[in-house]
Amino acid sequence: MIVLIDGRSGSGKTEFAAALTDGWPAAQLVHLDSVYTGWDGLEAGSRHVHEYILSPTPRFHRWDWHAVRPAEWVELDPARPIIVEGSGALSRANRALADVGIWVELEADERKRRALGRDGEMYAPHWERWAAQEQAFVDREHPQDLADGIVDGRDVTVGAAVWRPVVAPCESGGMTSPFISVSELDDTLRSAHPPVVFDASLVLHAAAYDGDYRYDNGRPRWLAGHIPGSRHVDVATQFSDTDAPTHYAHPEPQEIADELARLGVAEGEAVVIYDTTGTMWAARLWYLLRWIGVPARVLDGGYKAWVAAGMDTEAGATTDAAPVAPWKAQIARRAWVSREELAERAADDKRPLVCGLPAGSFDGTDPTRYSRRGHIPGSVNVSSRDLFTGAGTVKSRVEVILAYDAAGVDVAENSEEVLLYCGGGISASANALTLAAIGQKAVRIYDGSLEEWSADPSMPLEVK
């Protein structure tokens, strides 16, 4: 989540930002006063936001006002929310890379009274100089028009109360992001109400020839090393319909809830999921749990990131948690699209159909685990593995958007439902996870995917 807060000097944007972050410990607040390169630095500060703070590796170069020179670079955590406040934050270029833009408005005389009352001796000689830069920025960028909302600077606490549930839904029962960073998980595990942590590792082997389907339970990996207190779950048997003709068909909602209760997860209890196999299986379990409204998140970077950060680990079996009383499952969202719905799609259906498999599987050049090679006609390819870095962490919002854009899918504006498929509903779950991270929630998965589709000779497939 990236929030840009703009407004003229003295409007109350600093106070609004402080009120917005109050009680939101995950948020990182950047004041552009720490970035401006002196009293003529508004334009440079605005560009700095775009080039560095909104980059895949967010950071900013602090300006030392006393020494009148650049100071140190400050690194930001890309997995945590970032709030940028200051004149020049809400440019057109910056807004395109952010989730929310807010403009704080206050009449001119009151703004000047506030600003000079706060910083009078230092600021007074430069008031007109800075105001001219603000006016030039407003005339060129029209930040009020770019904003998702206008906050009245006379009482920013009211504005913060309105906007906090929007930008920080985790404080009102939702989630800021489907991902949780290593540092945030470490903090929550030390809190009074730590989440349940599941290791969902499963090893699905690449096909050596058509029809070659092999996988191994991930429990041996968990036994070799895991996050303290975590428990291994086998998605293939514990969270799949083992009577279905495909490998990982989703079970009924109540079956998911019953399995969670057996594992000691009470209704409404937070769950964090990770794996050692590229986040695909963590994503699948996340998708299933979010379907029935469980507050689940995925550890960004998985176990690899946890170890790389020097966190404690343990090995060997642990005592299972005691079961809790069964609870009633409630479907929280539409999650699935059927083979019949896809087969009957109209030619002018504008909803994109995206395959999350690697390019070689999509175009049919690589061996397939299934009956036939190829992809569903009319679909495009956005490999879920390409949405993660070499270190295993999710790529930036910009990179995810551009990956879909390269396939002709516009997900920046959350305008169309995105339909996803892959081989068996696993890679597609990772696509859904990364889409949720950028705010695209209108997603459904074809659960049978190519395993079901290719098994029916009447269903068409295309190859390169």
Image (cartoon, rainbow, N blue to C red):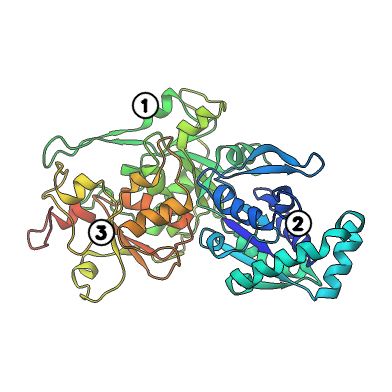
Q: Nearer the viewer, mark 2 or mark 1?
A: 2
Which residue is labeled 2 in the image?
A: 18
Element class at badge 2: helix
Q: Amino acid at mark 1?
A: Pro
Query: Considering only order in the chain, which callout, 3 or 2, is on the residue closer to the N terminus?
Result: 2
Which residue is labeled 1 in the image?
A: 220
Q: Residue at x 57, y 28 (%)?
A: 311
Q: Is residue 24 above or below residue 338?
A: above
Crowd band around label 2 with a 10 angstrom C-alpha radius: few (<14), some (14–19), many (20+): some
Whether residue 7 is visible: no
Which residue is labeled 3 in the image?
A: 380
Q: Amino acid at mark 2?
A: Ala
Q: Is residue 1 above or below residue 64?
A: below
Q: Is residue 390 above or below residue 55?
A: above
Horizontal arrangement in the rendering, residue 366 relative to residue 201 (left or right): left
Element class at badge 1: helix
Q: Nearer the viewer, mark 3 or mark 1?
A: 3
Query: Considering only order in the chain, which callout, 1 or 2, is on the residue closer to the N terminus?
Result: 2
Q: Amino acid at mark 3?
A: Val
Q: Position of residue 286 (x, y in %)?
A: 43, 50
Element class at badge 3: strand
Q: Residue at x 31, y 70 (%)?
A: 351
Query: Considering only order in the chain, which callout, 1 or 3, is on the residue closer to the N terminus?
Result: 1
